[in-house]
Amino acid sequence: MASPPGHRRASAPRQAAAALLLALSCCCCFRGARPAPPRVPAVIVFGDSTVDTGNNNAIGTILKSNFAPYGRDMAGGPRPTGRFCNGRLPPDFISEALGLPPLVPAYLDPAYGIQDFARGVCFASAGTGLDNKTAGVLSVIPLWKEVEYFKEYQRRLRRHAGRARARRIVSDALYVVSIGTNDFLENYFLFVTGRFAEFTVAGFEDFLVAQAERFLAEIHRLGARRVTFAGLSPIGCLPLERTLNALRGGCVEEYNQVARDYNAKLLAMLRRLAASRPALKVAYINVYQNMLDLITDPSTLGLENVEEGCCATGKVEMSYLCNDKSPLTCEDAGKYFFWDSFHPTEKVNQFFAKKTLDLCYEQLF
């Protein structure tokens, strides 16, 4: 058919190139290419040492990590910030991936102000838990106080940005919550708070899930709309627990079973909560499976040691026992799952952050 007047027929090579470009773009779509990052104005963090970016530096507790060799692999050179890691934590990687600063500042860090917190803030405290009694064991910030800091933050944010913009930041932010391990390992199974006499293990799981539900309902009332909530890891496979289980060897299966039972109850609660609060989106982070996958097949991330920490002997050391006096600290933390006897390395934290972001794109954004 003849071309209309003034129209130039595309050459065969040009048509072929256009077809190839279209095919490639479709191929990329089907392979699950991630869209551009959504507009998330801030990352707001609650929880324990898995996400505490330095709040414990400012309080009277022995549970600190603002000294070498913590932070030895931070970008730009060694810098112990109070993160229980050789480098960054999952919220830091999540923040950077969303186009926000590469470090989420701790709310109690005097080096930062509200202009920084408007783009990301961490209220987490190492050693805390869903149970207020857990925080009392090592005199850290209880979860209710983290929520009080969140309220104070909002008042400061309104003065800084204006009421309307502050409301948008709070409602459009991504909330990262990681908490629960200490309730079992530092509280219930350590027999120091009396909870073991007050509750059966199953009863304590129920109590913690109820506390988590109250917390989520409260931050939702305060404006949170998009939340990631981490389940428990295989807590019986932490190096410290392996060491204490030396007579039998390997992971403490009883503790792992508790983690699985708690996670099942937590997930059921999150589903009920989402059904009753349509404006609240909560993504459950399956840390248990993510960690188990790496322990089972460490080569997928190039790991060589998933049983001991890099710092010192890697069997019992964390906080002040993990210090720069030990000649046994490994040279390459990238080969290890754990940095100290309780916490992952930066490499594993980045892996966890990617898993979290993938879920955010599926369920929250």
Image (cartoon, helix red, strand yellow):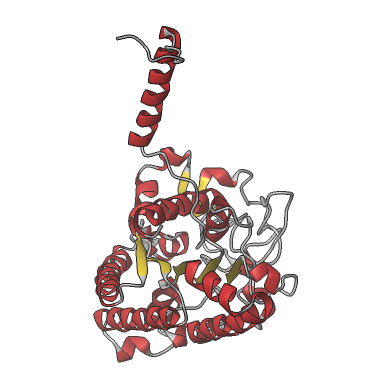
* Residue 307 placement (x, y as % from top left): 44, 52
Identify the residue shown where x is 46% and y is 50%. Answer: 354
Q: Is residue 304 visible?
A: yes
Specify whether 96 is left or right of 1.
right
Task: Judge left or right: residue 86 versus residue 113.
Answer: left
Closer to the camera in the image, 166 or 190:
166
Question: As rendered, which of 220 and 209 lies closer to the eye?
Answer: 220
Tell me where residue 122 sits by quadrant: bottom right
Q: Is residue 53 above or below residue 327?
A: below
Q: Is residue 248 above or below residue 139?
A: above
Residue 164 percent across, percent down from the top left:
56, 76
In the displayed structure, does residue 341 sit left or right of residue 356? right
Residue at the extreme front of the image, as rendered: 5
Q: Position of residue 126 (x, y in %)?
A: 55, 73
| Image quadrant in which the C terminus is located | bottom left
What residue is shown at x 72% (from left), y 70% (from top)? Answer: 112
The quadrant of the rendering that contains the N terminus is top left
